[in-house]
Image: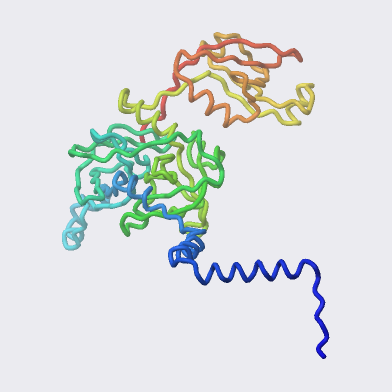
């Protein structure tokens, strides 16, 4: 006789449920099973940035420049006894130097942004569009201190790029670099925003860069850095490299600053910057100790003042320690210079400073800084 099998009270209901489920599956319509499989296949779709490229790429151009390099005549070429040696070995006194870079179409009527170093001293500038058209460009103006230049071309139906604001950028945002690296043709590389507000790199006088690991190589200069929506957020300008190639450390000028330079140059022919008329040095323990001030104090020590400049007229004196500019920390000299430069002539500046151990505030009216001459 067989021994009866005992079951746990929960086993029988569980087996009954399993049988019902299997029955439903066997009798389920094909569309039910198919939709389940399709759902599983699309859980993790592959994301593409092709849409962003389609929006931005037509506005990015290749720039080709030609510069005539004139050689100095050899001093013996005019000597009657030596002249025949040079006649037998003629050597041209000129040679052509070519270079390449990138640019961005900013307006439908033909204004472009690029880097100053791309077009500096060029005798001829040719702009090649993605649609195959080419045009000679006129240099409207340049700002060597920020390494920006404005060009103008005369063509119809120009695709102006859409812009965002660099103030919305966050570290970790996806960005695309579009340009003409190494002359191979328009190329798109992807990365993220690695840092913002980079300065003290020794590249230019005014530095406030977006850092990215999107591959940027020679020829990318002046090209576009765009966000995942295809909007311009920066102008690619430099790379940090020990090998000459991309090492994942590239820098772009934020679009807010670039747009301001574009507007200034288009309207006035030069960049317009605020000026205070002071020379400063960041406070350090040695200086503070010499002045008998607390070593923990942070600020900018005024070391020089331009006579009848904005700071002089407002009452600032040598030895004052500026701790705030318009209620913002003033412990970093480079940051303070950028902050003042961003002002327009006539804008009011509130300066908070320490003089003889006492904190005081004054208001100054920003002047206009004279731009450096083009090289």
Which of 229 and 344 lies nearest the eye of the viewer? 229
Quarter occupied by the N terminus: bottom right
Q: Position of residue 116 (x, y in %)?
A: 37, 40
Residue at left 31%, top 36%? 106
Residue at left 61%, top 12%? 316
Which of 31 and 190 lies nearest the eye of the viewer? 31
Snapshot quadrant of residue 291: top right
Q: Position of residue 331 (x, y in %)?
A: 65, 28
- 103 sits left or right of 198 in the view: left
Q: Count every numbered label the image shows and give the total.
A: 0
Quarter occupied by the C terminus: top left
Which of 89 and 55 lies nearest the eye of the viewer? 55
Outermost residue, front direction?
Answer: 1
Coloring basis for residues? rainbow
Vertical order, 42 against 200 (above or below): below
**Residue 68 seen:** no
Residue at left 52%, top 23%? 340
Snapshot quadrant of residue 48: bottom left
Q: Position of residue 235 (x, y in %)?
A: 41, 41
Q: Position of residue 355 (x, y in %)?
A: 71, 14
Residue at left 47%, top 35%? 166
**Residue 106 seen:** yes
Outermost residue, bottom direction?
Answer: 1
């Amino acid at each position: 006789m067989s021994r009866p099998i005992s079951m746990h009270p929960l086993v029988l209901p569980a087996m009954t449920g399993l049988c019902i489920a299997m029955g439903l599956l066997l009798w389920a319509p094909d569309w039910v099973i198919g939709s389940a499989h399709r759902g599983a296949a699309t859980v993790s779709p592959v994301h593409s940035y092709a849409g962003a490229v389609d929006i931005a790429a037509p506005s990015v151009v290749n720039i080709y420049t030609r510069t005539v390099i004139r050689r100095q005549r050899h001093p013996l070429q005019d000597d009657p006894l030596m002249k025949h040696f040079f006649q037998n070995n003629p050597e041209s006194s000129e040679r052509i130097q070519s270079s390449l870079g990138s640019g961005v179409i900013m307006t439908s009527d033909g204004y472009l942004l690029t880097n100053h170093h791309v077009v500096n001293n060029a005798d001829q500038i040719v702009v090649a569009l993605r649609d195959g058209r080419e045009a000679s460009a006129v240099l409207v103006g340049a700002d060597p201190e920020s390494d920006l230049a404005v060009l103008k071309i005369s063509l119809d139906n120009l695709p102006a790029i859409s812009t965002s604001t660099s103030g919305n950028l966050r570290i970790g945002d996806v960005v695309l670099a579009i340009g003409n690296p190494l002359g191979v043709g328009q190329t798109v590389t992807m990365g993220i925003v690695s840092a913002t507000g980079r300065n003290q790199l020794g590249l230019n006088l005014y530095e406030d860069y977006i850092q990215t690991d999107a591959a940027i190589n020679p020829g990318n200069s002046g090209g576009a850095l765009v966000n995942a929506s295809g909007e311009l957020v920066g102008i690619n300008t430099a790379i940090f490299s020990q090998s000459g190639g991309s090492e994942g450390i590239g820098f772009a000028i934020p679009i807010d600053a670039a747009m301001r330079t574009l507007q200034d140059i288009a309207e006035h022919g030069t960049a317009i910057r605020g000026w205070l008329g002071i020379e400063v040095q960041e406070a350090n323990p040695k200086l503070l100790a010499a002045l008998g001030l607390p070593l923990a104090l942070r600020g900018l020590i005024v070391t020089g003042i331009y006579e009848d400049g904005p700071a002089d007229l407002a009452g600032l004196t040598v030895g004052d320690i500026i701790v705030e500019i318009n209620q913002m920390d003033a412990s970093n000299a480079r940051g303070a210079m950028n902050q003042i430069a961003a002002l327009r002539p006539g804008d009011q500046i509130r300066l908070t400073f320490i003089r003889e151990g006492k904190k005081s505030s004054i208001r100054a009216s920003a002047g206009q800084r004279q731009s450096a001459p083009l090289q």
